[in-house]
Image: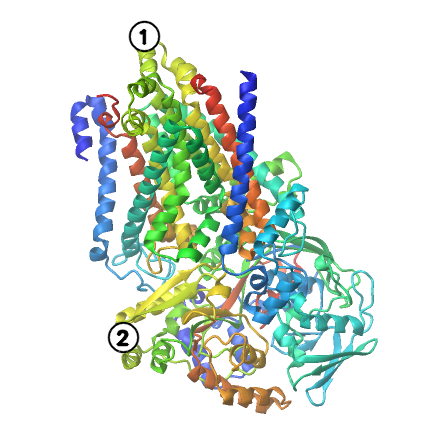
Amino acid sequence: MTVARAASSRRSFLGHSYNLVGVVASLVILAWTLVAIFAPYIIPHPIGDIVDDDYFGPMRQGLWLGSDYLGRDMLSRVLMGARYTVGISLAAVSIACFSGVVLGMIAAVTGGWFDTCLSRFLDAMNSIPSKLFGLVVVAAVGSSIPVLILTLAVIYIPGAYRFARALAVNINTMDFITVARVRGESTIYLIGSEILPNIIRPVLADFGLRFVFIVLLLSGLSFLGLGLQPPLADWGALVRENIGGLPFAAPAVIVPSLAIASLTISVNLLIDNLPQKIRDRDA
Amino acid sequence: MKSGVLNLVLKRLAIAIVTLLIVLFAVFFATSMLPGDTASILLGQAATPEAVAGLREAMHLNDPAILRFLRWLVGLLHGDLGTSYANEMPVAALIGGRFVNTMKLAGITTLISVPLALTLGITAAMLRGSVYDRTVTVLSIGVISVPEFMVATLAVLLFAVYLKWLPALSSVNEAHSLADLVRIYSMPVITLTFVISAQMIRMTRAAVIETLSTPYVEMALLKGASRSRMVLKHALPNALGPIVNAVALSLSYLVGGVIIVETIFNYPGIAKLMVDAVATRDLPLIQSCAMIFCLGYLLLITAADIVAIMSNPRLR
Amino acid sequence: MTDKITNWTGADDAMVENAIRRGASRRELLKMLLAGGAAVAAGGVVLGRATQAVAATPVSGGNFKAAGWSSSTADTLDPAKASLSTDYVRCCSLYNRLTFLDKDGKTQMELAESIDSKDAKTWTVKLRKGVTFHDGKDLTADDVVFSLKRHLDKSVGSKVAKIAAQMTGFKAVDKSTVEITLADPNADLPTILALHHFMIVADGTTDFSKGNGTGAFVLQTFEPGVRSVVTKNKNYWKSGKPYLDSFEFIAISDDSARVNALLSGDINFAAAINPRAMKLLQSQQGFELSKTTSGNYTDLNIRLDMDPGSKADFVTGMKYLVNREQIVKSALRGLGEIGNDQPVSPANIFHNADLKPKAFDPDKAKFHFKKAGLLGQSIPVVASDAATSSIDMAVIIQAAGAEIGMKLDVQRVPSDGYWDNYWLKAPVHFGNINPRPTPDILFSLLYASNAPWNESQYKSEKFDKLLVEARGLLDQAKRKEIYGQMQTMISEEAGTIIPAYISNVDALSSKVKGLEANPLGGMMGYAMAEYLWLEA
């Protein structure tokens, strides 16, 4: 937020409108974060209570977003859903991208056997169907929210790794890296000061996409019995359980879809519109 | 030079085989960790201990799992994928037609989505910051943030139920002409294109922008080279590595990840076969499906790696 | 106009309840239930049409395409192994049984001409003559002996091995007479033989992929997990039948996709639709619904031999905490009948109509939980998509518990492996039981002390004695009395809470004629293919 504003002051008229998008995006994210934090205090009905005799009820007074397939208040469910979608997905995507990118850069810089082994190992991991993986996790360590976050992260590490490595390998051949190497710089310096600044934009774009994937996969894993337990539900799960309302354009299915779209689009737009400063190389 | 490439390919192939073995073992290990075996799952609610024991005996499930795994591997060397536990049919017969279906769907989707995504990604990067760029971003993210099953269901409701232009089910055995083929494949292909294009668009855009901002491209631009020429001649080849990786990762989804599309359009492919196999703990079938997924994936990423290396003279 | 069906109202409750109270005959009640109760009151376009269909004259010809809801590579044409509705439908089109249940739940003869016994222990089956298998072979006593006896062979993996175990002696007396001896007298044998697993196959069959039976259709294509196509058996022994030229069966596991395929005209018939899709179907022209309330139910099982079920007050408390009306109304959208914690549904002639379901009473529940010392403790309740509607039911019970300070911790577990890992095992969990034709089967499988699926570990010597006593009785009235008493015992003593019997609704194109509800399940007890015809 503050960064965005600082940047906008630096820019011309065109630059200003350019950053307006970033500001709006970050406002949306902030709003959802606040909802996530305060949801339990602001929901009008307990999320498990059936308050409507009808199902897929329309928007009306008292049930501002209508009712779901059981007749539960959609507003409360969407607000509470924000907690899980925002919280769990952000945690998972951060772990996945951080580990993936760091490993990818190390592999690119180090090369040799370390690179080969790690690459093959992660390729192998990526070839295991995620459903099978999810089932094994439930069977082996049971179900809890930390396990859910880790599972999501593990599923997405190989992808993040592969992409970051592909980028880093290209940079690694550049003259300035060779120069730095000759200077005798450490691997940590190389990846932190030379490689990362040069791949940060695509890496962040990757982060944004992975975030979308995780938001969606989250509901799939919940259905395998991993993590969230009824009556709790993330937005993806809300869409899924109310999909029967689609022919009637029920708010129960439209609203959580819009919520997902608003969050994921904002995250990606924010990334696209991050101020120049962050990615300036040797400023 | 040529032998260098050949060497590289051979080396990568050798590594791919090792990876495949690791995956097969990992999948085998994962399956044996899951509670329940084929006998008890086939009997379902009728699984009394005696009944399970009897059936297990009859199905030769009493041998240690690792022995059955090794036996399957040996069979594989002779080109035999084994026999399904669940229905005693040869695995090859079960997979055969479905594999062709999967490949058809994946092929058509690739033909449509890859050119589309690359074009959108590159043009968005060239016009970075413009309304066009932002529209592409919002649309591509918007499209993947809608769950796949919703896109598919919506498409069916619109095109099959209300407009009645297309059939709701993709019955492959009813394809007799090109027109049939188009009717049958339109909806699954559109859905899948939606799902996999975003990643390619976004990654292409990011990679091209990144190379556009490298010093030598910036220098060339300052010297007055035209932007589109720059992109095509210099930025693109340099961004090729990350792009082909993104394409490979997206396409690998088409081999084993299309379960939702297969379910909703009732399209008989191998993703659903794998799910069935896991549900019945049908080891030979799981292994064979896992092998196909893994091979497909390895093929794609190995190709991607080789393209990446070839495109960057310094990596050769 | 049809809102009444989708939106269960108090009036519908009262109607069924009154009918039960005034002692409606089973037939009346069944008719009412099948007609959808509320639908009749609301002018039921939807379900009232079955009678018209019967009056119309069948026409031959046409290709019928139907979709069930589940199928996998484990699909089989071996009747003994049949486990999904998909298998039943296919087997019904290819094979015949000795007997079958008609729409009123009465046992009728099919391949058997008669099944008689003097002592309910030794039974004589006279076979119909002139029946041939698809490959041209005549049906003989040997085929019947082979078909029944194989259920006892453990390596076959029969789903009804436990039920078949009571048949101890099989003898082909002559070419068309079989003698079956039971370990203990059982008056229900003719009904038991109507189970789908007891289809008659040719003697010595080991490869069932050909589907060689005596049934109305001949197998053309069978791809497990994908589809099957069968074509008219021109030599079928039931004259005039079947009407259809061919019958294709697929499975579409996605609820909305199944309905959409029907609406778009890709299929003629969609089995077991989600109650919430009824609004959509009613908004479109040319489709009808058929409702069947058979004995299918999802139950909450509290094991009496483990904590917390070992405290009787917990079990009693839970029975008061379950809001059955809400479950029928919200979870099943009115497509079910309120249950009274025992497995014999109103569709069964032995149903005890005097047994009232426990009313929802949170205060009483709270009283009992307090007495058990469990109020405020967190009790895990295991639910899964594997057991129909169990997650919705769990959430409803959980919310009711939250009101009175009883914390129920709903644990959603994967459907994959549910029956293996959680069912019968977890202290408090959900189960789902398919309809069984006789109380004897239900009780022996689910409530006898040595029952293989004794869901709550209910043990009662008195119950076991009554079970054996009723089994051998040929006097129906006396049996009904004993079974009534046993239902009361289960309802009050066992730890299984059966909040509702779940109705099945099939949706079909109006062109499809001849469909009638059947107490064995949807799709005319899975045997619809041979009775239906397509209007030109």
Q: Residue at x 48, y 83 (%)?
A: C459
Q: Residue A25: which quarter of the image?
A: top left
Query: What kind of residue is marked 2?
Result: Leu
Q: In which quadrant will I find the C terminus of chain A?
A: top left
Q: From what the image shows, is residue C225 above or below residue C407? A: above
Q: Residue at x 48, y 64 (%)?
A: C421
The front one of C230 and C335 is C230
Spot occupied by residue A237 in the image (x, y as percentages of width and height):
38, 52
- Colour style of the rendered protein structure: rainbow
- Please say whether residue C390 is visible from this viewpoint: yes
Q: Residue at x 29, y 33 (%)?
A: A271
C412 displayed left or right of A62: right
The front one of A65 and A145 is A145
Query: What kind of residue is marked 1?
Result: Lys
The front one of C517 and B172 is B172
Q: Residue A210: which quarter of the image?
A: top left
Q: From what the image shows, is residue B69 above or below residue C295? A: above
Which secondary structure lies at badge 1? Answer: loop
Mark 1 and mark 2 on one chain: no
- What residue did someone put label 1 on? B223
A75 displayed left or right of A108: left
Q: Judge the density around disc 2: few (<14), some (14-19), many (≥20) Cα neighbours within 10 Å.
A: some
Q: In which quadrant will I find the N terminus of chain A?
A: top left
- What residue did someone put label 2 on? C375
Q: Give the CA distance from mark 1 to mark 2.
A: 80 Å
Q: Judge the density around disc 1: few (<14), some (14-19), many (≥20) Cα neighbours within 10 Å.
A: few
Q: Residue at x 49, y 35 (%)?
A: B251
